[in-house]
Amino acid sequence: ALPISEAAVSRLLIYDLVERRLLRRIALPRDARPVDMASEGRRVFLLTDTPSSLFVLNAWSDLKRDNSLSSELTEADTAARLALHPLSKEPFVLVNAGMDAARIIPLAQSDEAFSVPFATDLEFVPDSDAFEQRWCLVVARGAGQDFARFAIRPGAVSQITNLKARGYDGRGI
């Protein structure tokens, strides 16, 4: 199934690609403006910025607001991007994108949130420096800047060697 967010009409569409048909139309709360989405198996995570909220949809269940994000934000924070850890399947949320106050919140361990000034996007990729299969979080910043990389381990986040981003225009990864 392919989830598609229709931000202009605050709606989520679920398509069956094999059967080539629309399976569901899901209305979002009127005040919810989708900004990013990620899926894993039968779960779809939908991030909104007005207000900053995370919604979760499990297969044929109703859309539910996940309050773990709201409890971590101040009134000045705005959620911007979302990535799922490939192994734990837990969401990581970038707030205050493009600002000095940008930070990343791993929702399963929100006490391990960390600052990445001027971050604009995030994505998990295989860690090419590791001998065993591990994943690192790649964080984009402004146009022409290298991508920051972070090793995410239980109880620890450490910055590792940056990736050269020649020709990066500042848009999404």
Image: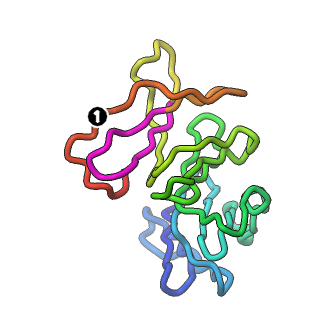
Instruction: Name the residue: 45% across, 26% down.
Output: 127
Instruction: Name the residue: 79% across, 59% down.
Output: 71
Q: Is residue 14 above or below residue 122?
A: below
Q: Nearer the viewer, residue 33 or 64?
A: 33
User: Which residue is farthest top?
Assistant: 131
Q: Nearer the viewer, residue 79 or 5?
A: 79
Residue 10: horizontal and vertical position, in percent?
57, 82
Instruction: Name the residue: 33% across, 58% down.
Output: 171
Q: Nearer the viewer, residue 12 or 105?
A: 105
User: Which residue is farthest front?
Assistant: 100
Instruction: Name the residue: 20% across, 46% down.
Output: 167
Residue 159: horizontal and vertical position, in percent?
51, 28
Q: Is residue 127 magenta?
A: no
Indicate the quadrant where residue 64 lies. Answer: bottom right
> Mark 1 belongs to which amino acid?
Lys
In magenta, the rendered stretch is 136-149
The colour scheme used to paint the residues is: rainbow
Read off the residue under disc 1: 164
Indicate the quadrant where residue 88 lies. Answer: top right
Q: Is residue 102 above or below residue 66?
A: above
Instruction: Say what secondary structure mark 1 lies in.
Output: loop
Q: Classify 10 Å Cα crowding around label 1: few (below 14), some (14-19), many (20 and above).
A: few
Q: Nearer the viewer, residue 88 or 146?
A: 146
Residue 38: horizontal and vertical position, in percent?
54, 56
